[in-house]
């Protein structure tokens, strides 16, 4: 028996498959990790395996922890706990009921020097053995463990999730404090297979406002000296949600004219992003689906109320209505004169106005005969026109022709624009006449000047003077004026010419005072 015990003590602790003679086994987590300055709770049970010896529970049962070597000595400096021994202060205190085979132990105020392998031994009047195959490895660290943050459930708006901050708790008698960004509830300690964990939880009904929210949790471990060792962790929520803040933007902004190209853009905040946009226009029969896509471009021909619906896998978001109003005319009309603007020519005068919305054309009015307007189409472009034929005379030169185009706009009113042209008609000499200087009575030999005037376009470029004689009109001079000394009475006239024709003035008679007929 003595030899057998010596062999057991000399053998080192084995791993799984230990083939050494072994009369004692323990069950405890190994390795175990502890924080320097704190304590370690060691859950432990043992079982005697000897076929020859048996623990006598009627007598005291002593539990002993020692480290480093298998050989145990009562005077060994490696002894860390001897149950029932009040003569010494041991760092390890066996709290379990050894008679009930519980070797649960509290290890106080650990330091880095306590990094080692520990063995458990039982001594009794009828039994003495060391668990040679079941050692306990203790690792001591200076820095605390970072807590763990978990979010249960699906991170989607309206979902109720449980957020848990957990921290390993090697010493449940001195658990860490867990302050965090959420409501500071009461922490609780759980145990799983001898491992303790401190937890704090909160239930949250998720909204889009929680997306991107960073939750930070601190673990503050109390250690000797009244200090705390701290570590923290954080997690950022990623919440999916349906479309929010859906709105419509109009381009161009400001006043709109009939037929103008308008682009409506729909925007919405969503996660995942919006995958479908639908456009609606209010009508007397209800909302009408008018387009699909992020933007809706069209040529506006009448005002109306529009809105968009943004959709993703989590729902829809509807924008407020946006009202489009036509408040401006698309342009000014134009006036064209066909043919040459020369007297006697028959020309066609046309007033035209662009008509982007042929079902709501502009009304054309002018100072000429108010005929019937008609709409023409060329390559998809519509134009409203009104025409009149005129035989030109010199009276039309300088005539101002104004045409108005009244376009229907929102509110049942019209927006009017106008355009004006002035006719430029060429014509032959008109109102040709002669003026005598000096006027009044004339005497023989007196100097006389005749001046010829005429209205023409282009201006008269040639004047010819004639005097009636018995042989007919005699050409007596050229030029705008004709000066001579009057020696005999006579009848004179001038002829004005330009590129479009000639005209003769009325005859003027020059008489000499005192000369008998």
Image (cartoon, grey):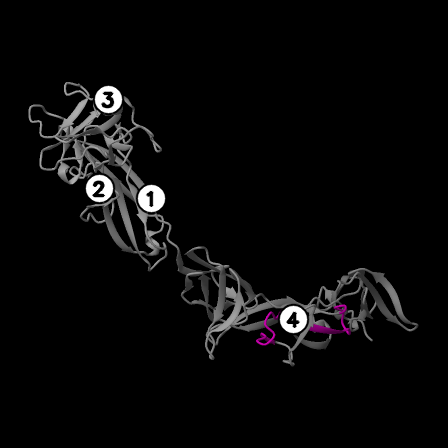
Span shown in magenta = 339-366
Closer to the camera, 40 or 298? 40
Residue drawn 21% across the image and 49% down it: 183
CA gap, disc 2 to disc 3? 54 Å
Which mark's residue is nearer the viewer, 2 or 3?
Answer: 3
Discs 2, 3 touching: Cβ within 8 Å: no
Quarter in which the N terminus is drawn = top left
Quickly name the residue at label 2. 178
Vertically, is 60 above or below 250? Answer: above
Of callouts 2 and 1, the N-terminal one: 2
What kind of element bears circle 2? loop
Crowdedness near tag 1: few (<14), some (14–19) or many (≥20) residues, C-alpha within 10 Å:
some
Q: Within the image, what quadrant is residue 224 found in?
A: top left
Of callouts 4 and 2, the N-terminal one: 2
Residue 3, disc: 3
Discs 3, 1 touching: Cβ within 8 Å: no
Quickly name the residue at label 1. 235
């Amino acid at each position: 028996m003595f030899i057998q015990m010596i062999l057991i003590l000399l053998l080192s602790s084995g791993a799984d498959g230990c083939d050494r003679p072994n009369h004692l086994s323990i069950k405890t987590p190994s390795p175990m990790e502890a924080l320097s300055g704190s304590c370690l709770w060691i859950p432990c049970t043992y079982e005697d395996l000897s076929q020859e010896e048996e623990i006598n529970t009627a007598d005291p049962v002593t539990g002993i922890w020692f480290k480093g070597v298998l050989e145990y000595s009562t005077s060994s400096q490696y002894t860390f706990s001897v149950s029932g021994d009040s003569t010494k202060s041991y760092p390890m205190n066996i709290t379990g009921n050894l008679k009930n085979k519980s070797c649960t132990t509290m290890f106080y105020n650990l330091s880095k020097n306590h990094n080692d392998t520990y063995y458990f031994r039982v001594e009794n009047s009828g039994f003495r053995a060391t668990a040679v195959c079941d050692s306990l490895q203790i690792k001591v660290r200076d820095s605390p463990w970072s807590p763990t943050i978990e979010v249960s459930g699906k991170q989607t708006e309206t979902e109720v999730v449980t957020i848990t901050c957990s921290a390993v708790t090697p010493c449940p008698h001195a658990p860490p404090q867990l302050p965090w960004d959420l409501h500071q509830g009461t922490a609780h300690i759980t145990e799983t297979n001898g491992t303790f964990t401190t937890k704090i939880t909160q239930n949250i009904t998720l909204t889009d406002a929680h997306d991107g929210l960073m939750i930070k949790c601190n673990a503050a471990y109390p250690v000797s000296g009244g200090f705390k060792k701290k570590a923290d962790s954080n997690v950022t929520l990623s919440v999916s949600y349906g479309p929010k803040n859906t709105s419509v933007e109009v381009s161009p902004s400001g006043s709109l004219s009939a037929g103008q190209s308008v682009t409506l853009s729909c925007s919405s905040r969503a996660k995942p992003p919006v995958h479908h946009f639908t456009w609606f226009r209010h009508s007397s029969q209800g909302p009408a689906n008018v387009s699909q896509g992020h933007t809706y471009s069209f040529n506006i021909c009448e005002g109306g109320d529009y809105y968009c619906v943004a959709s993703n896998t989590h729902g829809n978001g509807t924008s407020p209505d946006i009202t489009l109003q036509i408040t401006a005319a698309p342009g000014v009309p134009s006036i064209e004169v066909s043919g040459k603007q020369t007297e006697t020519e028959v020309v066609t005068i046309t007033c035209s106005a662009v008509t982007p919305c042929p079902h709501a054309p502009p009304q054309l009015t002018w100072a000429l005969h108010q005929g019937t307007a008609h709409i023409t189409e060329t390559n998809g472009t519509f134009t409203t026109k009104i025409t009149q034929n005129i035989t030109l005379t010199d009276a039309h030169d300088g005539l101002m022709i104004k045409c108005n185009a009244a376009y229907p706009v929102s509110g049942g009113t019209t927006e009017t624009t106008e355009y004006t042209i002035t006719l430029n008609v060429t014509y032959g000499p008109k109102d040709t006449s002669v003026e005598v200087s000096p006027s009044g009575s004339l005497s023989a030999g007196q100097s006389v000047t005749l001046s010829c005037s005429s209205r023409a376009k282009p201006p008269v470029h040639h004047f010819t003077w004639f005097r009636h004689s018995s042989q007919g009109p005699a050409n007596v001079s050229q030029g705008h004026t004709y000066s001579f000394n009057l020696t005999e009475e006579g009848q004179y006239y001038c002829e004005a010419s330009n590129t479009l024709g000639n005209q003769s003035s009325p005859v003027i008679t020059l008489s000499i005072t005192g000369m008998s007929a």
